Amino acid sequence: MKVFNSFNSTLGQTYLNTFKGLSKEVWWLSLITLINRAGTMVIPFLSLYLTTDLNFSLDDVAWIMSAFGFGSLVGSWFGGKLTDKIGYYKVMYFSLILSGLLFIGMQYLETFALISIGIFVLMAVADMFRPAMFVALNAYSKPENKTRSITLIRLAINLGFSAGPAIGGLIITTMDYNGLFWIDGISCMIAGVVLLNVLHPKKSKTLDNEISLNPKSAYTDKFFIIFLLTMVIFGIVFLQLISTIPYFYKEGVGLSEFEIGLLMALNGILIFTFEMPLIYWLENKTHTKIGLLAFGLGLTCLSFLFLIMDPWLGFVVIGMVLLTFGEMIVFPFSNSFALVRAKRGLKGEYMALYSIAFSISHIFAHNLGFHLIDAYGFIKTWSFMIILGLFGLGLLIYLKSQMKSQNNY
């Protein structure tokens, strides 16, 4: 019994040690992100809302989700430009407050045209937050703590995400979808109020003062462009999680919205429990960031094999676990790669392009996924995602070979 208690104590202390050394500004930024993300429960249910509540066809949903991606792209690009001009603080505050109002307004749009325009505008405003937040994170993090700071932000995101879908599924079951839009909107505005009161730039101290004396454009960085291409590919495969995979859970496996919410919550619970220790452990190894990205993408591809095997709940759960561990590795280390690379030039430009890579993924991922399912069914769609992911894996292996002399990557 003493050995067991000693093991538990050591394990707990090791877990707590992974959080040491992070600045208080990073903790405040994580709290703001947690509040914001806790209410974004409508996103995993968006495709279900459009098909079941508004009775749109899969073709209509595919194009609406493309508007979602185009809005994200515009918001990420514009957010990066504004961040370099007026600073991250103003961009984050404006994005949180206005997107909250837009979320509330979305429930009153019912036609295909209005919803498409509404989703585009909403995502354009909401995703201005991302490059600004990354630049803020870069300013508030010591160089040696960047990956763990990113992981703490993701921990906050997924702590909110783990509870959000389960609560969202319960709200849909007992009430309707409109409540989700209200919660999304109010939580965004609360996050904006918290930002205004606890994280003011005049009270902050920049911890990372490394500045490039000869800044280079991200558009001329060949390795960074190849990296972005692999992130677009990963994004197309991974983002099936918030559109076609919930649809598959309902139509292919026969789960209810509440059961889907619980399964989606598993993603957040696993990340909350394992990501920080996993990243802390991997950071202390000799693996390169690119090598870790390749491993994470490989796990993501493997997860789709279990969706192909059989619509049995056990395989579905295994697929979710593999997809989650792939996500745990790819997002923190890809983010860290982009932040380190951004020291070569304008940080806003680099981080905007990093965000835009996933915005491009949003444009193609949901549209492509739903059209493939409509035309060929679930199995061929998942097979296509595996092949696409393997192509991205090949690009990462090539990139690793080209950058083998650069130890930071």
Image (cartoon, rainbow, N blue to C red):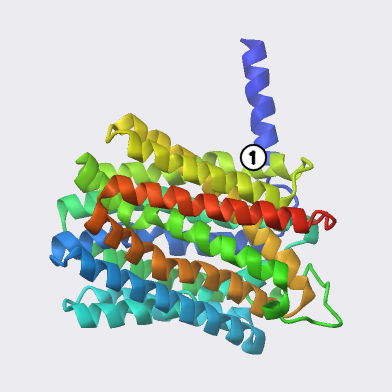
Q: Position of residue 174 (x, y in %)?
A: 16, 51
Q: Which of 135 and 296 is in front in this view?
A: 296
Q: Position of residue 190 (x, y in %)?
A: 43, 70
The residue shown at (47%, 71%) is 360
Is residue 246 visible in the rendered structure shown here? Answer: yes
Task: Tell me the amino acid under the disc marked 1.
Answer: Pro
- Crowd rating for badge 1 (residues with CA inside 10 Å; few <14, some 14–19, many 20+): some
Task: Check disc 1 and report its element: helix, strand or loop.
Answer: helix
Query: Going by the image, does 223 lie left or right of 41?
Result: right
Where's the N terminus, which quadrant?
top right
Residue matched to label 1: 277
Q: Is residue 295 above or below residue 365?
A: above
Q: In this view, does 68 lie above or below 292?
A: below
Which residue reaches farthest bottom? 85
Q: Position of residue 148 (x, y in %)?
A: 68, 52
Question: Which corner quadrant of the image does residue 309 belong to?
Answer: top left
The residue shown at (23%, 49%) is 170
The residue shown at (30%, 51%) is 246
Q: In this view, does 266 lie above or below 357?
A: above
Q: Where is residue 136 in the image (x, y as percent from the top left)?
A: 65, 71
Which residue reaches farthest top? 1
Query: Going by the image, does 243 lie left or right of 393?
Result: left
- How many numbered callouts? 1
Where's the C terminus, which quadrant?
bottom right
Q: Nearer the viewer, residue 280 or 251?
A: 251
Is residue 202 visible in the rendered structure shown here? Answer: no
